[in-house]
Image: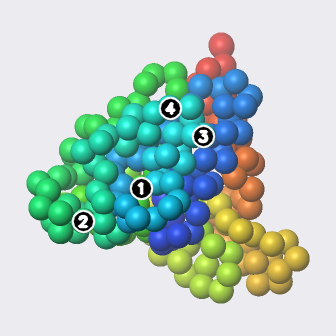
Amino acid sequence: MLIVVTGTGTDVGKSWCAAVMLTSLRSQGLPVAARKPVQSFDPHDPHPTDAHVLAAASGEDPERVCPPHRWLRIPLAPPMAAAALGHPTFTIADLAAETRVAPGVITFVEGAGGVRSPLADDGDTATLIAALEPDAVIVVAGADLGTINAVRLTIDALRGHDVLVLLNRFDATNDVHARNRAWLADRDGLEVHTEPEAAAHALVDRHWSARTRKP
C-alpha cells in the first residue's frame, strides 16, 4: 500500500504527521516503511532532517528513507538546491525510479513543500504522485485562517486521487478551526481528520484491510 503525504505549503507539519502515522501503525504490528525521494535542508539546523524523523518512526536507516545523493545541504526547493550546489539536474522519473516500495508494506512517501513546490527539474509533488499512482494521498494543512483556500487549491492539483485532508495543530475549542473543518467537510465534501492516527487507520481500513482480506 502506497500513501503520499503532501501539504498546502512548507512547515505545515508533513514530516511530524507522517511520523505519528508510521509509529501508530507500526505499534500495532503492521509492516511500514517511509520514503523521502529528495530533501533539502540547512546543515547547521540542530533539528533532525525529515529523513531522520521518518526513519526513527519506521525503524529504518535514514539513508534508506532518502538516498544519500538526494540530501541537498541548502534550504531551497530541491531543484534549486541542486543547481546552487552544482549537482546534476534530476527529473521526476529519476525520483520515482528510486522510490522503491516493497510489496506487502504500508509505505508513506513524503514530498517537499506544497504540492506545487518544485520537486525536480521537470515537476513537483503533484507530478510525482501521477508517476507513482499511490493508493491514497494525505494533504496536511494548518487549521487557521486561509486553510480553506489553501486546501482547495491543493485538492485541485490532485483530481482523480483518493485524497484525505489532515488538519494539523487543530484545536477543537478554536472557533475558526472548528468552522474551517466543518466547511471543508460539509460544504466541500472532503474527508477531514484532525488526528494523524485516525487518518492513518482510515486509509488502512479502506485500502490495506480490503487488499489483505481473504475471500
* Disc sitting over residue 57 in the figure: 3
Q: CA distance from mark 1 to mark 3?
A: 17 Å
Is residue 103 at least partly visible in the picture?
A: yes
- Tag 1 residue: 111
Q: Are marks 4 and 2 in contact (CB under 8 Å)?
A: no
| Label located before the other in sequence (4 or 2) | 4
Q: Which residue is mark 2?
A: 81
Q: Are marks 2 and 1 in contact (CB under 8 Å)?
A: no
Residue 31 horizontal/vertical position (percent)? 59, 25
1 vs 4, front mark = 4
Residue shown at the point (75%, 69%) measured from the top left: 170
- At 53% across and 70% down in the image, what residue appears? 11
Dot 2 or dot 3: first in sequence order is: 3
Q: How is the image coloured?
A: rainbow
Measured as percent of width and height from the top left, residue 112 is found at 40, 60
Image quadrant for the C terminus? top right
Amino acid found under the numbered disc labelled 4: Glu
- Labels in figure, total: 4
Which amino acid type is marked by label 2?
A: Ala
Viewer-proximal residue among 196 and 79: 79
Horizontal relation, residue 199 to residue 127: left or right: right
Q: Which residue is mark 4?
A: 60
Alpha carbons under labels 3 and 4: distance apart = 8 Å
Report, in whole angstroms, how far the alpha carbon at label 1 lies from the one at label 4: 18 Å
Disc 2 crowd, CA 10 A, few/some/many (<14, 14-19, 20+): some
Q: Amino acid at mark 1?
A: Gly
**Residue 154 visible somewhere in the drawing:** no
Q: CA distance from mark 2 to mark 3?
A: 26 Å
